[in-house]
Image: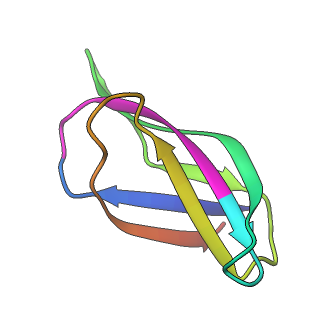
Amino acid sequence: MQYLDATRSEHGKGYIRQVEVFGSRDGNSWQTHRRDGVIFDLDKSEKLKNDSISIPETTFLYLAIRITNGGKSPLKITVLRQFRQ
């Protein structure tokens, strides 16, 4: 299984965002690779956080993400890494 992990520059601000992942072999033509990802950071009575989404195994050379902000302030992503587990 492959994963994408996002690191944000600010902490402690609650959010829930939908994430789409796109793949490309040439960097020009993009295909939807995953459309139902969700990342969140909630601080209720206990801390709930998920900054990683799983993605199907792929041979795409390029990956891109789209985070839907839904009218809220954009997240400030400082690092996005891909890893396998």
The x, y position of residue 85, in whole percent, is: 66, 66
The x, y position of residue 32, in whole percent, is: 75, 54
**Which residue does the image show at 62% across and 61% down from the upper left?**
3
Q: As rendered, which of 11 and 26 lies closer to the eye?
A: 26
> Which image quadrant: the N terminus?
bottom right
**Which residue does the image show at 66% across and 78% down from the upper left?**
62
77 vs 24: above or below = above
The x, y position of residue 23, in whole percent, is: 72, 67
80 vs 39: above or below = below
Q: Is residue 68 left or right of residue 25?
A: left
Residue at the extreme top: 45
Q: Which residues are magenta?
A: 11-21
Q: Is residue 26 left or right of residue 82?
A: right
In the picture, residue 16 is in which quadrant? top left
The x, y position of residue 13, in whole percent, is: 20, 34
Report if residue 27 lies within the magenta region. no
In the picture, residue 46 is in which quadrant? top left
**Which residue does the image show at 55% across and 44% down from the upper left?**
19
**Which residue does the image show at 78% across and 58% down from the upper left?**
56
Report if residue 20 lies within the magenta region. yes
